[in-house]
Amino acid sequence: MTRFIFITGGVVSSLGKGLASASLASLLQARGYTVRLCKLDPYLNVDPGTMSPFQHGEVFVTDDGAETDLDFGHYERFTGVPAKATDNTTTGRIYTSVLQRERRGEYLGATIQVIPHITNEIQDFIREKEGSADFVLCEIGGTVGDIESLPFLEAIRQFGNDVGRDRAIFIHVTLLPYIPAAGELKTKPTQHSVKELMSYGIRPQILLCRADREITDAERCKIALFCNLDEKKVIPALDVSSIYEVPLTYHAEGLDVQVMESFGLEDNIDLDLSKWEKIAETIKAPEGDVTIAIVGKYTNLADSYKSLNEALIHGGIANKVKVNLKFIEAEIFESEDPEVYLSGVNGIIVPGGFGDRGVEGKILAAQYAREKKIPYFGICYGMQMAVIEAARNLCAIKGAASSEFKVCDVPVIGLMTEWVQGDEKQERGKDGDLGGTMRLGAYPAVLAKGSKVAEIYGTKNISERHRHRYEVNTNYIEQLEKGGLKFSGMSPDGMLPEIVEYEDHPWFIGVQFHPELKSKPFDPHPLFISFIAAAVENGRLV
Ligand code: GLN
């Protein structure tokens, strides 16, 4: 029997509902249950694929090629359960599906309304998860009180009513702000938020109260009284120094026990959280540190590279070091000497990216890393930049560029219009929907015998997630290899270059995919373990 946990948020956005959901899921796993996490997003975009990472943070890609919200990254990193395209929906997708059905006449002439048609469509999304896990945790994006999330709240109310209290509970994540003049945490916004939720017919069984300091018993009592709850169901969720401590602190505050109790389930398990304890301890007491430069765009919003930042932390955990990140806006190198910014760093990453801005700076960063023998990790766009750099500076192909650039004389990186996935031929055109022209999701690659990547992965066949439109133009492979750049990973049909590396460099690897999406704190990605190890080595040499 599947049980459902709905997680809503109140008072303000950015409370870390995604992390809360992921952490609770990991505690349920530690109790021996299977879990599935899903999310309802109230915005009108069909998916976050076309949204600016500047506004929305990174786009997380699943194995089956869905472009999702970055919370799915948290879900996977905390539970190890690969997310699926069917785990996420948005208002845009719900409406699209209802309107398509209306056009096909499937509603038999009925007047189409938010209730029941939209709310039924939302419930179908939830109901479809039945039987897929012991617990389905469903996060509702947005903040209670927003107009946008109303149909979702109505849908989960109806759903909860339908399946009954022993199969569906509601957890509300709120904020207790500290007011310095009063010297106390304020409970009023939480009271109002719960009142608002109750006005929609939803009574939360558990409150997770975010606060930047200890919540006193008196404050907890007050919230319990005003919100109709047992005090034990008002759970403090205080700020912690590392997100990987969250499962431990939630457990210490009794969250999982209260969830069991709310479902009327027995609580006779001694939880083994040693996996999380080990991670938290390693993060707290590193044996050294390294500094990694991330030369990209959007670097003023760390969320745009969320999974990358986390994967680097994971690489740090594996090497028992703290990883300091130095974000550098690539455009700077177009007017200033990279040396000034890069001379002290132990490793350089050029991450994924789109568009023209800052590309020359990224190419210069790749050149600097190659010439100065600093570990270089090129991810997707960063790999393409390394290829262009090699074409220009090692193979004397003047004007080498990507057809994504405004000016491109020689398309060393270009648009491939066809490729094969499984037995199926796929196509993309320059004029297609922006959301539909990318190579998305997991694709296999074969690693060259004796290459550095083959050694790092310890296997010949890999599968990694992609999200890009352009590919290395295979017409230039021979020339580039003569120049010294080795193509050490290719798609199984040999058509699509996947990995490049230099043999005469301590660590220079470019990958067409996004390895950061699959890294976990308890299972760091081999490329990140190896890259951070190389950075540690670089630090020793300096
Ligand atoms: N802009 C490049 C492309 O579309 C790289 C994309 C990426 O880095 N994710 O191919």
Image: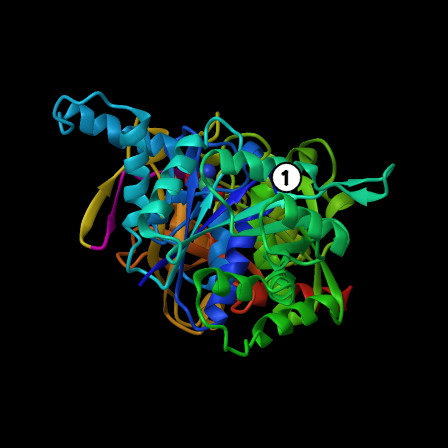
Q: Main secondary structure of the magenta part?
A: strand
> Looking at mark 1, is its residue's CB closer than 8 Å to ligand 1?
no
Residue located 58% across and 51% down the image: 229
Q: Is residue 302 left or right of residue 164?
A: right
Front position in the image: 165 or 213: 165
Relative vertical location of residue 506 with respect to residue 141 in this rendering, above or below: below
Which element is circle 1 on? helix
**Quadrant that contains the C terminus:** bottom right
Q: Residue 416: within the magenta?
A: yes
The quarter holding residue 320 reads bottom right
**Quadrant that contains the N terminus:** bottom left
Image coordinates of residue 410 in percent, x first then y, are 43, 34
Kindly identify which residue carries mark 1: 191
Image coordinates of residue 96 in percent, x first then y, are 29, 29
Image coordinates of residue 393 in percent, x first then y, are 56, 44
Q: Residue 400: within the magenta?
A: no
Front position in the image: 54 or 170: 170
Relative vertical location of residue 266 with respect to residue 7 in this rendering, above or below: below
Residue 533 visible, this angle: no
Residue 105 visible, this angle: yes
Q: Is residue 435 left or right of residue 357?
A: left
Relative vertical location of residue 407 with respect to residue 515 in this rendering, above or below: above
The quarter holding residue 100 reads top left
Residue located 65% across and 71% down the image: 319
User: Magenta residues, as a range?
Assistant: 412-422
Q: Is residue 269 left or right of residue 429?
A: right
Q: Is residue 473 left or right of residue 379?
A: left
Q: Residues within 10 Å of mark 1 (few under 14, many from 20)?
A: many
What kind of colouring is applied to the model shown? rainbow
Q: Quadrant of ligand 1?
A: top left
Image coordinates of residue 502 in percent, x first then y, are 53, 60
- Type of the residue with mark 1: Gln
